[in-house]
Image (spheres, grey):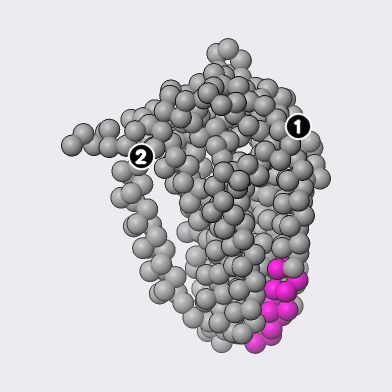
Amino acid sequence: MDIINLFDYATLKWIWWLFIGALLIGFAIMDGHDMGIGTLLPFVAKTDEERRIVINSVGVHWEGNQTWLITGAGAIFAAWPMVYATAFSGFYWAMLAVLWAMFFRPVGFKYRSMIQNETWRKTWDWCLFIGSFVPALLFGVALGNVIQGVPFHFDDTMRSFYTGSFWALLNPFALLCGAVSVAMLVFHGGVYLMHRTEGIVYARTRKTLIYSALVTLVLFSIGGVWVAGMEGFVVVAGTLDPGGLPNPLGKEVVQQAGAWLLNYQHWPLTMLVPVLAYIGMLAALVLARAGKTLLAFVCSAVSVAAVIGTFAVSMFPFILPSSSDFRSSLTVWDATSSHLTLTVMFFAIILIMPVVVAYTGWAFNVMRGKVTAEYVRENDHSAY
């Protein structure tokens, strides 16, 4: 059998849309609960010992969880090179802001407890907050801008030109999406924090869940109504070949009110995706308050995946629509690498991903259990 031609080009493009979506969802679930806990840190832990309990609840996993971001970015670079080039250059300052904020996380974890000084430790606690809150906000802002369309265009040599600015990214709808992202990850992190702690930290975190869940679902609903009346993008029928060679300028795209809801009309089963966002979060809230925190974390992860999946389903086949030159919009069908590249990477990820998932599951299983005040005292020099 000819392995290289196991899948036709159109099928591979669709498969890689699923793969990259899974990697980004994996990042949101795994590193997202770290960011949620970092955002909660100054509010659910009042004493130094309590804050060390919170920090050590993710201390053994946070570095591994960040690799999902690197893997996702690498997959975009390899499978969707034009998306990578356009988005990373257009969102340059936003990406730098995310990186600058994330720099606080490794140094915060490593240096925070090295000196017995209250001011020193509180400073690093707020650095960990910044390193968690800012990325969570800006990732949501980025999604909000993508669904509205990004001001870029290609010239005849396929060079991309971004014509927007950093401050234009901070528009009302994008900030709404950023707020959804922060509230969602605070809830997700709160559920995991309850799973790993007990006592006063557990009790304070339990109280925050109902507020973060309420804010997430209300803002997510407002965003849905907003999107319903928004002018989305539609590829004119017959101008784009799913199995054709990449050529973003070879299609015709128009704007249309309510376009982002068309996929739900064409494939009614996709309505289950946004519905799962509500069901998963409400189930997680009920289970967490009942003390079944592990199952609550699974339901919360389903909700996170469904919120991100709602964006993906609504926009399909668009990946990065252009608001300034509609035909320059990048889609699943015309922004990919070659058939050979997608095939080789398909087999690579099929071999590697099960190992990564298995190792992650093993690591979490080995490091399971509650982080207590006794644990922090007994490991005063080695714990964060």
Seen in the picture, residue 359 relative to 244 is either above or below; the reply is below
Quarter of the image with the C terminus in it: bottom right
Q: Which residue is mark 2?
A: 345
Q: Which is nearer the N-term, disc 2 or disc 1? A: 1
Report the residue that reaches farthest toward the top: 156
Q: Which residues are magenta?
A: 199-213
Three-letter residue code for mark 1: Ser
| Residue 15 place in picture, x, y as percent | 42, 42
Residue found 63% across the figure and 25% down from its top: 253
The residue nearer to you, when weighing 167 against 156, is 156
Q: Label for residue 252?
A: none
Seen in the picture, residue 313 relative to 232 is either above or below; the reply is below
Alpha carbon separation for disc pair 2 and 1? 34 Å
Is any part of residue 276 visible from this angle? yes
| Residue 370 place in picture, x, y as percent | 53, 82
Report the residue that reaches farthest toward the right: 172
Is any part of residue 380 visible from this angle? no
Quarter of the image with the N terminus in it: top left
How crowded is the residue under tag 1: few (<14 C-alpha within 10 Å), some, or many (20+)? some
Three-letter residue code for mark 2: Met
How crowded is the residue under tag 2: few (<14 C-alpha within 10 Å), some, or many (20+)? some
Given this view, does label 2 or label 1 mark the residue nearer the observer? 2
Seen in the picture, residue 34 relative to 198 is either above or below; the reply is above
Residue found 63% across the figure and 42% down from its top: 262
Which quadrant of the view contains residue 328? top right
Q: Label for residue 165?
A: 1
Seen in the picture, residue 146 relative to 127 is either above or below; the reply is above
Check if residue 207 falls in the magenta segment: yes
